[in-house]
Amino acid sequence: MPKTTPPPSVSLETLQTVLAATADFAAFAPWEFAYDTDIVGLIDPVTGEVRIGCVLGNAGEVFGIVIYRRAGIRWILSMLEGGSEDFEGLDAMEGMDCLKIEFVPKRELAKEDLAVLKVAAFKPSGKGAVWPQFRSVEPGWHPWYISQAEAEQLIADLPRLTAFYKMLEEHPGLFDDRAPTEVPFLPLAMPQRALSPQDIDWRPVLLSPEAALEPFQPAGGVLDELRALKRLPGCVCEFDCAILPGGSFIENGRPCFGRCCMLVETRRGLVVGVSMLSGALPVGEAAGRGLIECLRTANVLPEEIVIGGSRFQSALQPLCDALQIRLTPASSLPALDEAVASLSQHMSGRGV
């Protein structure tokens, strides 16, 4: 198996600064009074990028701070709109995009974490879950070590988040009677005093329609190859392309999750095609490549392919049109779900 590359290089000065800001944040243990849903909005004063901060730890299990960015903002707002406090309830590997600082016992730190803390001469205050572990999380990828640019982002964001949660401790009713997606945004220029509720700009942050996936374009000659397959009138198959936690790849020296594409014939519930791809691939490209490999394995062209929802439709529609296969979004994929459940049971050793 290919080896991973060393963590990104971060300057000593930056490391020491971000560790000092992290220690200031942890010193007053905001998880003792703040909930996962007590989120705060930040606007980058240089780029204008919106980010969402969230404390972890009120349940007494995981202690830290998460700063959602880019696609991660959609993920956290989806959680809040759904009214759930179970932040592992959605498939985080598909939508999670954030920077995370988790405070853990020293034994849980990787050797790379320990090396960084040693170089910076960091010594935590207290015992137990007091050692900071910095991670960058992007859709499809395993959590990874932060880069210089990400460390600089934390240096900018952490003091502002510290000021907010100190203010929240003084005003515990701040979120009373507020909608889940009504977010308190911090001012671009923070005041040279303790933050107050009057400094906060409450804004409703609504989910915009998710951008359609790019149409998949097969390589030359592939369509002719697939058109030559036998057609099965009346044959209906279900197809999905999902992150598989148990399968991983190394891409550019960094671990990513595997993506499993599966084609199941609905009448008999038979798996007729499976393809494993890297989770680092763009989702639409992975779906297109996976469907092609599944059709090759099946060695036939069904009359109809059913997909879960409309997520993959824009990516797969041109390919299915070219192959004269009807593509149908549906609210559920019962045959595929049953096949996955059976496969999982077999792999776990619980099969009969």
Image (cartoon, helix red, strand yellow):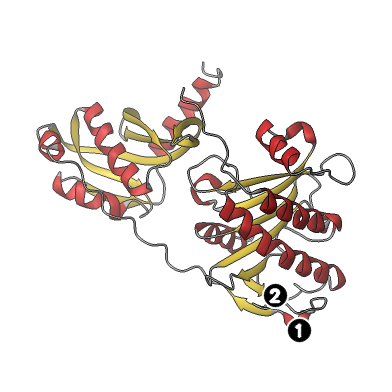
Tell whether 180 sits left or right of 282: right
Judged from this view, the residue extending furthest toward the bottom is: 198
Precedes in sequence: disc 2 or disc 1: 2
Tell whether 175 sits left or right of 306: right
Q: From the image, state whether disc 2 or disc 1 is nearer to you.
A: 1
Q: Residue at coordinates 68% horizontally, 74% vertically from top-left?
A: 186
Q: Which residue is mark 2?
A: 178
Q: Residue at coordinates 46% horizontally, 22% vertically from top-left?
A: 1
Q: Residue at coordinates 33% horizontally, 40% vertically from top-left?
A: 239
Determine if residue 84 is in view.
no
Task: Residue 54 in the image: state x and y as whole percent.
Answer: 69, 59
Three-letter amino acid code at disc 1?
A: Gln
Where is 228 relative to 182, above or below?
above
Q: Residue at coordinates 36% horizontally, 36% vertically from top-left?
A: 261
Q: Which residue is mark 1?
A: 198
Kindly report the distance in space between the C-alpha atoms of the residues bearing marks 2 and 1: 15 Å
